[in-house]
Image (tube, grey):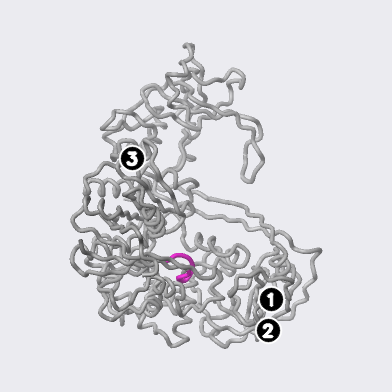
Amino acid sequence: MANAPSEEVAIVAYAQTPCYRAYPEAEPKMIMSLVNQILDEVKIDRHSIDFTMAASCDYLSGLPFAFVQNVDGYGAWPPVYESHVEMDGAWALFEGWVRLQMGDIDTCLVVGSGKSSPGTPREIFPLQMNPYYGAPLGIDPVSLAGLQAAALVDAGKATEEDFAQVVSRSRRDALDNPFAQVKKDVSVEDLLKEPYFAQPLREHDLPPITDGASAVLIARADKARELCDKPIWIKGIDHRMESNNPALRDLTDSVSSRIAAESLGIDGASFDLAELCVRYSPEEVVLRQSLGLSDDCTINKSGGPLCGHPVMATGLARVAEVARQIREGQGQRGLAHAASGAALQQNLLCVLEGGA
Amino acid sequence: MSLKTTTYTLEYPYTRTTGPVVGRFLTNLRDGKLIGVRTGGKVICPPVEWDPETNKTIEDPDYVEVGPGGTVKTATWISQPTRKHPFQEPFAFALIELDGCDTPLLHAVQASGPDAVKPGTRVKAQYREERTNAITDVYFVLEADATDQYIEPGPGEVEMTEHLISIDFEEIMAPQRLRFIEGLKQGKFIGGKSPVSGKVYIPSKGYDHIERVPMDESHEVEVQQTGTVCAYTIITPVQYYGQEETEPYIRCSILLDGSDQVLGQQDIRDIPVDEFRAGMRVKAIWKSEAERDTSEIDNRWGGTGACLERWEPIDEPDVPFEKFSEHVF
């Protein structure tokens, strides 16, 4: 692999909160429950964690310096060595992985968390668009997903039935996921009877509004073997980004995820399972094609983000899910994908494998 | 059971310099024209500062007037617009290839329904009566619905653009915070006592952040009405957006007797600035029960709302710094 690590790093433990429609208490309490769960499972004291990587966004719940309060959840006293990204937790994982490549520390705790419930995501997300040409128009992720869907249909690359199939399968799979927020056995036929929301998308093609957090503990090889019986190895991790102007992109393709896959030297057909950050059903159509996943690959067995979308934790939850599925014997090699920005503007891929 | 919620509006008035390229585009919009920039053999609207293929600065930009007509490439019908959208009734967001352009512009089209805006549909630019030097000065309608407009050019070049960001939040009041508020209404300060260390935090966050354990109603205790000033600052109000204060005032933190965490953001108005000091002993003087107002207390900030008349100095020796030094921040 082009980006093969010099230091082997593995996931030692993972944890997720349920996907809450509205978590009634403060975000740090949600984080604390996950961190304590991981520490209990691995049987280490939090002071033996070398580095903490956090991911959250103050704008989501409208609380300036919320990311500082969140440190309560990781454990702030005595002071800890930590860093923060205003990105999904999967990018915090990337930074943690890079930090472990330096070889001087062994462990890194990675947490992504967010409460979307206090705000109106469709009014908050336009603020990440170009401040002159995009944000004043209030262009929101739902509208952009609508444009992406329309572009796919117009180009003959997908149909509304394809979108409904993604939703039907995801919501049915979510029936087995205790963390999922939206779960239902519903047929494609019934889904297609629903009215449009952002034509050609219907409301069920959109993710729910979710509060939640996810966390993983990663470690260098020797430490990973010491801390757990079944380390889940990070065989490669890469992320790439496209233009912030959606009008200058081909919305029917995902150039950045393809480049990330190429740089990792991965063959899409080699995966037993994948968890893709499909927040809008057309994104699965685009990603299947750009990543070259085979029909045998199990995609989003958890139900994926269509069944629970804790913004800032959604991507890291994909990593946690793949690690869980491999550890529980559902496959040997898995792909976790995280996305950020408008209509799959930015994509991260993480290849995970079981084995001693 | 319906949960008690609190609402909150976050507002920032952004004023941004435009730079020469965006400024030129917004100046033209104000004056009723659309321009693009030629780069790498393509015309792009709105104009960009860098070539999107090579990322190189576009030197000596060649601006080209484009539109006002254009062709829809892709469209989605927005049946439930947000308050931040250009139209409050259903409309289309579309990728519009303006006449003379090689790439589309993402903008809004006003039309009667989804079937009216499809790939190939011809649209035309229309300008808002009141223009604000922003991308929203223009919008699009079906070519057949367009009217001729006379746009009076404005004075000078657009160099600044304003964007008021205003977002509303509504969240569930945390249960321990509601009990803290209930205490204030009854003239009591309620804190949470850690089941591990025995330290008392006020108001309770619903967890002990040092020992890392959750806490609930069973851990709550009343603390005393007297305390020690640990730190203070004299604030001279700067007249920023949203500022309501005009005269200098003191904000201090007070460590109530029987607690291990200061009560922050306490307002001091009637102790002269030159008599105020850290280490000073004070006691809470409450407003009458009917006058106590907790409406400003939310999950986010500390404070005691408008429940206290004042903090009154008490006739006791000052507490030496060493006794409260760990509470100064």
Residues at marks 2 and 1 touching, judged by CB atoms closer than 8 Å: yes
- Amino acid type, label 2: Gly
Residue B116, placed above or below residue B131: below
- Circle 2 packing at 10 Å, graded few (<14), some (14-19), many (20+), is some
Q: CA distance from mark 3 to mark 2?
A: 61 Å
Counting residues from the N terminus, which is met first, the one under dot 2 or under dot 1? Answer: 1
Quadrant containing the C terminus of chain A in the rendered view: bottom left
What is the chain identity of the residue bearing mark 1?
Answer: B
Image quarter of residue B106: bottom right
Residue beneath label 3, please?
Answer: B206
Asked if the magenta segment contains residue B166, the reply would be no
- Front residue (pair A126, B112): A126
The N terminus of chain A: image quadrant = bottom left
Disc number placed over residue B100 in the picture, else none: 2
Label 3 is placed on what type of residue?
Answer: Gly
- Per the rendered image, the range of residues in magenta is A339-345
Query: Is B127 on the left-hand or right-hand side of A334?
Result: right
Label 3 close to label 2 by CB (< 8 Å): no
